[in-house]
Amino acid sequence: MFHRIRRRAKEPSEAQRQFAELHARLQDQAPPGFQVPAPAEPAGAVDDFLPPELRVPSHDQVDGKMMPWKQPLVLDGEMATCAQCGAYRDWLILSTRGEIWLRCRAGHQQQETRLDTAWYNRNSGPADATHATFEDCLRHLGH
């Protein structure tokens, strides 16, 4: 019994054949009252829509990024401290060339190997400014 049903299912039914014929006839037709849009003319080349002063530099044009980190930085259950002065809060975290550096309020810098660029990207907010020099960025962040 099931073999007969399967044999019938392999061939299209009469309704399926009628639908296919109707579809083939009506494929290029539009319903009455429906206006077919004229083909659009190709658009010419357009300059970039943003003026230069509003463009954000790409990653290859930026030497690094930095963000303030006011609270203590705990890594692997241990509080990060400055190797020279012992400061443990109010860091500037710098991300440059795939490395993460910590800078304390006194200006000491040390590389932090327990952090990576992915951690920086997860914890940093959007950039609020770009600066031409490292010192300009330090002034902007109050260091």
Image (cartoon, rainbow, N blue to C red):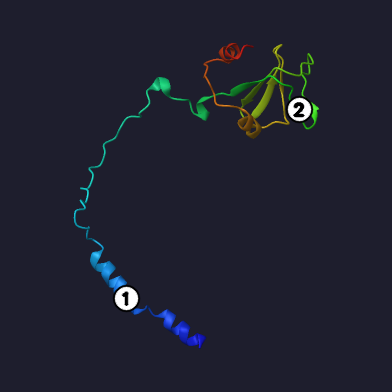
> Is residue 113 shown left or right of residue 118?
right
Q: Quadrant of the C terminus?
A: top right
Tell me if mark 2 has few (under 14), some (14-19) or many (20+) residues whose alpha carbon lies within 10 angstroms of its own. few
Disc 2 residue type (three-letter): Val
**Secondary structure beneath disc 2?**
strand
Q: Earlier along the polypeptide chain: callout 2 or callout 1? A: 1
Disc 1 residue type (three-letter): Arg
Q: Residue at x 27, y 72 (%)?
A: 21
Q: Please tell me whether residue 22 is drawn above or below residue 30 in the rendered image.
A: below
Q: How far is disc 2 from disc 1 in space, using C-alphas?
A: 71 Å
Instruction: Report x, y in % for residue 117.
Output: 63, 32
Q: Quadrant of residue 12?
A: bottom left
Instruction: Report x, y in % for residue 116.
Output: 67, 32
Q: How many marks?
A: 2
Residue 38 or residue 102, whichever sits in front? 38
**Secondary structure beneath disc 1?**
helix
Give me the disc on residue 93: none
Residue 118 or residue 25, whichever sits in front? 25
Instruction: Report x, y in % for residue 34.
Output: 21, 53
Mark 2, mark 1: which one is toward the viewer? Answer: 1
Q: Residue at x 25, y 42 (%)?
A: 42
Give me the disc on residue 74: 2
Q: Residue at x 76, y 19 (%)?
A: 88
Q: Residue at x 57, y 13 (%)?
A: 140
Instruction: Report x, y in % for residue 83.
Output: 78, 18
Residue highlighted by disc 1: 17
Tell me if mark 1 has few (under 14), some (14-19) or many (20+) residues whose alpha carbon lies within 10 angstroms of its own. few
